Image (cartoon, rainbow, N blue to C red):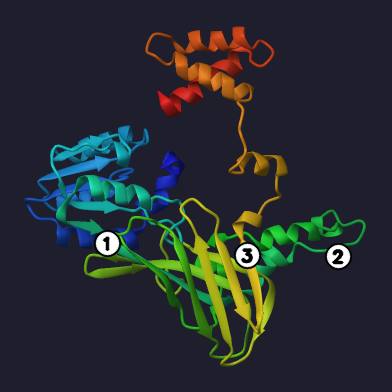
Amino acid sequence: MAGYQSIDSHRSMLFDEVRNRAYGEAITAAVTPDSVVMDLGCGLGLHGLLAARAGARKVYMVEPEPIIELTRRVVAASGFTNVELIQARAEELVLEEPVDLIISVFTGNFLLTEDLLPALFTARDRCLRKDGLLLPGGARMRVAPVSCEQYFDAVVGRWGAASGAAADWSAHSFDYSAVRPYAANSTYYDSAKNFAATLLTSPATLHELDFYTATRAEVDAELTFTAADAGICHGWLGWFDMDLGAQSLSTSPLSPPLHWGQVYMPLPEPVALQPAQEIGFSLQRATRGDWNWATQVAGELVKGSTFLERPFDMGLLKRLSEGHQPQLNLRGEAARLILSLMDGKHSNVDIAGQLVRQWPQGFDSSSALELVQAMVRQYG
């Protein structure tokens, strides 16, 4: 949850009335006076507070980030005494009793982005009673081929050969066509309003996850679509629908806008589709891996991958290969020394001083202390 430490990162979620109404109705329907509830990744605590207000016997608010200290103040100001706040990650959770309900918002854009679902599965296995409930209980990845000429031109098409006059001060004066392949292999997260995309077929479910039984958050699936009318395809738009109790909440471009958006996976060049023409799509992504998509149309296979969205550092790729035998660099040696001295007997300044004495050419007192504090933030 490292991306949710600032207040601003919570603002769009906390004030997403469409989402919060759907969650609130599902929570109210699920909670009884005997319910023990966990708000996993609680942030500023809205869903846990909704559960407390719905009459839950006990609510555990779980959040690994320091923002939980602000949440404590929110809970206290709201006057609830049936709430316990726990600063921990899912794999660290040890509760006095199993919970009847786990509430989470671990669905990133297009479901798998952010890779938070594995933490939900861990908490489920550690803390949810056998016949307990999950909100949400599952979700589906949805996709459709789209025409979005303006957006395509803005993010892919504009990377091209020089088109401006010599006196033009803009980037159009120069040849940036070398950048275009990287742009075409990138994924773009935005709102339906900005995409302004026209769906060329009905959307279809690419992949479905049952949060009660899933153990992995990844996708390897393919679909075939049939164009209803002629149109220019610029790529694919993806989103997800989730199950909240008896109702569904959709992040579709055709639904009311939420803090989630959609994802656009471009084609390198637009493709003209004819009525009744088939177009195939496949998508693969392992947990914390790259998005790999392919389009099959008119006998041609066109691939895209976020692995190709940035220039390669060949030295880094070699070091990351399975057969490479790594050796610590200066910063690695320093990290090893810092970890060995994090024994409860040395202050941060003491450890920083040892770094400076050990590697006077590599650290001054300021940079040494900065590294020590970074290590403490993560491991201490």
Eyeballing the image, is 155 above or below 224?
A: above
Q: Report how far apart the C-alphas of labels 2 and 3 lie in the structure.
A: 27 Å
The C terminus is located in which quarter?
top left
Q: Would residue 291 be visible to someone looking at this image? A: yes
Task: Depth check: give the residue in front, 154 or 321.
Answer: 321
Q: Disc 3 marks which amino acid?
A: Gly
Task: Depth check: give the residue in front, 39 or 49.
Answer: 39
Q: Report how far apart the C-alphas of labels 2 and 1 lie in the structure.
A: 52 Å
Q: Disc 2 marks which amino acid?
A: Ser
Q: Report how far apart the C-alphas of labels 1 and 3 lie in the structure.
A: 31 Å
Q: Please name the residue that numbered disc 1 is placed on.
A: 137
Q: Please name the residue that numbered disc 3 is placed on.
A: 304
| 8 left or right, relative to 334 | left
Residues packed near mark 2 inside 10 Å, few (<14), some (14 to 19) or many (20 plus): few
Eyeballing the image, is 143 above or below 346?
A: below
Task: Depth check: give the residue in front, 204 or 216.
Answer: 216
Tell me residue 28's x, y (percent): 17, 59
The tally of labels here is 3
Q: Please name the residue that numbered disc 2 is placed on.
A: 163
**Would you identify the image quadrant in which residue 365 lies?**
top right
